[in-house]
Image (cartoon, helix red, strand yellow):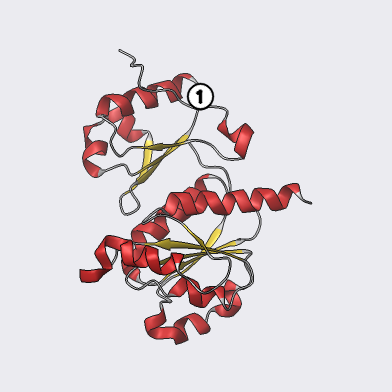
Amino acid sequence: MPTTEVMLDFQRAERIGFDEAILCQGKTLEHLTEILATARANSASFLLTRLSQDQLEGLSKSDRDALDYEPVSRTAYFGRPKPEAGPARVAVLAAGTSDVHVTREIQRTLSWSGVPSTLFADVGVAGLWRLINRLEGIRAHQIAIVVAGMDAALPTVVGGLFGGVVIGVPTSTGYGVAAGGHTALHSMLASCAPGVVTLNIDNGYGAACAAMRVLHSLERMK
């Protein structure tokens, strides 16, 4: 039976340029089942985020079969993503391989909306030569989403070397005083590189949406 706890936003793309995504964290299987049924009834497609393996396995076989699920990012596509068009204007930088859960969420979100991106993995400041060697490729983009945990110095370094928009995403990667990403968050907020935008801890989806807002603004100015 439908609940009064679900109300989908089918007009969001018309207002802001990209569709609503379904945050699965905290939702019951009944909620998810109703959301997918409502999407089917309206011939709608959705990106699902923070979909756990347990939630996925709890869905009916027909619902599971309808989802393109990526377990590391915990994202799923219900329906087909928009085709990617044009060269990549978003660079996604990962300080370390341990940040992959966030970088994949970013790239899956961008790809769902048809926005191509380029991944520059394992370019953290512990081996600064790896970043320097890839600067030319990074500078070919308009936006750099920089993902880092631990001391999260990478967005500050990128902010001094890259002239486009820099979006920092602190991750929960680290131990001890890394405090589940709070040290990384505070480091990015205290960055001495002017104009670095900082998202919440592990918020790859939000970073991708911020990048898409920038791109849509650039398109409107043409």
Q: Position of residue 118 (x, y in %)?
A: 53, 64
Number of other residues with Cα within 10 Å of mark 1, as a class: few under 14, some 14 to 19, many 20 or more: few
- Residue in the foreground of this view, choosing between 67 and 156: 156
* 139 shown above or below 5: below
Residue furthest top as drawn:
1
Query: Residue sitting at 32 percent across and 62 percent down?
Result: 182
SS class of the residue under badge 1?
A: loop
The residue indicated by pointer 1 is 43
Q: Position of residue 88 (x, y in %)?
A: 60, 61
Relative placement, left or right, of 160 versus 25 is: right
Q: Position of residue 71 (x, y in %)?
A: 30, 50
Relative placement, left or right, of 155 versus 50 is: right
Query: Residue sitting at 47 percent across and 48 percent down?
Result: 109
* 167 shown above or below 159: above
| Residue 27 visible at all | yes
Query: Residue sitting at 35 percent across and 64 percent down?
Result: 99
Relative placement, left or right, of 196 versus 124 is: right
Residue furthest bottom as drawn:
129
Q: Which image quarter: residue 52? A: top left
* 135 shown above or below 219: below
Q: Which image quarter: residue 151? A: bottom left
In the rendered structure, which amino acid carries the disc numbered 1? Ser
The number of numbered badges drawn on the structure is 1
Q: Position of residue 191 (x, y in %)?
A: 48, 71
| Residue 174 visible at all | no
- Residue in the foreground of this view, choosing between 13 and 198: 198
Image quadrant for the N terminus?
top left
